[in-house]
Amino acid sequence: MHIVCSDLEGVFVPEIWIGVAEKTGIKELRLTTRDISDYDILMKKRLAILDKHNLKMQDIQEVIESLDPFEGAVEFLDWLRPRSQVIIISDTFTQFAGPLMKKLGWPTLICNSLSLNKDGSIIDYNIRQKDGKQKAVLSLKNLNYQIIAVGDSYNDITMLKAADTGILFRPPDNIKNEFKELPVSYNYDELKKIIRKTLETT
């Protein structure tokens, strides 16, 4: 039995924080886990920027509501579901994810959460578990599942390496060149081919 574990942003939907940066004009919010490998450092930067500019949860949710899945993402998930169980394992937050999960057909999601003030300001973020992507994959492997993992950023690498098959999807050159041992796909057709071959041979 196989399970496909995939990242969310960069694989099925645009990066939320880049969307916020484009709407607000705050260039520093364009930084993602493609740029900064330490997620704690990245999130502390983001929270400091939100506080500085008085941005609230509602401001971010308005951006999220305007985002749509990548072209072909919904069709890819529809293709995948009859062939394998699918779990989205993301460093996003429950308060962000709802509109995007609805547009993707409500796949199973494992993610983190935020702490909010009554005025809607974001005061902290709560990691479900340190290196939770890797640990989720290892837990599923302990249940005797074969795991195919898909991701695009530094925070996906331990998950990809823990999986039986790890696949980079549209990675930036710095990540592709740093982790040359991982197969790379640049569109959903290429991703299908790798997954199909894996399902047929394992």
Image (cartoon, rainbow, N blue to C red):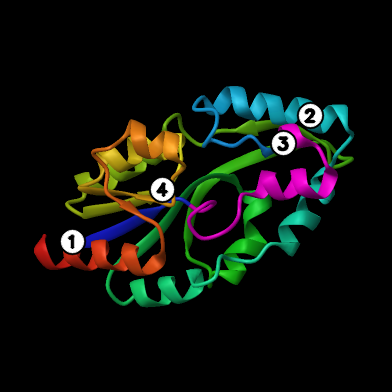
Residue 29 numbered tag: 3
Mark 1 nearby-residue class (10 Å; few <14, some 14–19, many ≥20):
some
Residue occupied by mark 2 = 49
Distance Cα–Cα, label 4 vs label 3: 21 Å
Residue 61 placed where, x, y %? 77, 54
Q: CA distance from mark 4 to mark 2?
A: 26 Å
- The front one of 175 and 95 is 175
Identify which residue, 184 or 2, lies in the foreground. Answer: 184
- Callout 3 crowding tier (Cα within 10 Å): few <14, some 14–19, many ≥20: many
Asked which secondary structure carries label 3, the reply is helix
Q: Quadrant of the C terminus?
A: bottom left
Residue 19, x across and y down, in percent: 71, 50
Label 3, label 1: how far apart the Cα atoms are: 37 Å
* Residue type, numbered disc 2: Ile
Residue under numbered circle 1: 198
Residue 104 coordinates in the image, percent (x, y):
54, 69
Mark 3 or mark 1, earlier in chain: 3
- Provide the secondary structure element on which disc 1 rests: helix
Q: Position of residue 21 (x, y in %)?
A: 76, 43
Name the residue rendered at 83%, 50% in the picture. Answer: 58
Look at label 3 and name its amino acid. Leu
- CB-based contact (under 8 Å), mark 2 and mark 1: no
Mark toward the start of the polypeptide (2 vs 3): 3
Residue picked out by circle 4: 151
Q: CA distance from mark 2 to mark 1?
A: 43 Å
2 or 1: tag closer to the N-terminus: 2
Give the answer, above or below, for where 122 lies relative to 19. above
- Amino acid beneath label 4: Gly
Residue 27, magenta (yes or no): yes
The boundaries of the magenta stretch are 8-29
Instruction: Give the vertical position of 56 relative to 167 (above or below).
Output: above
Is label 2 or label 3 in front? Answer: 3
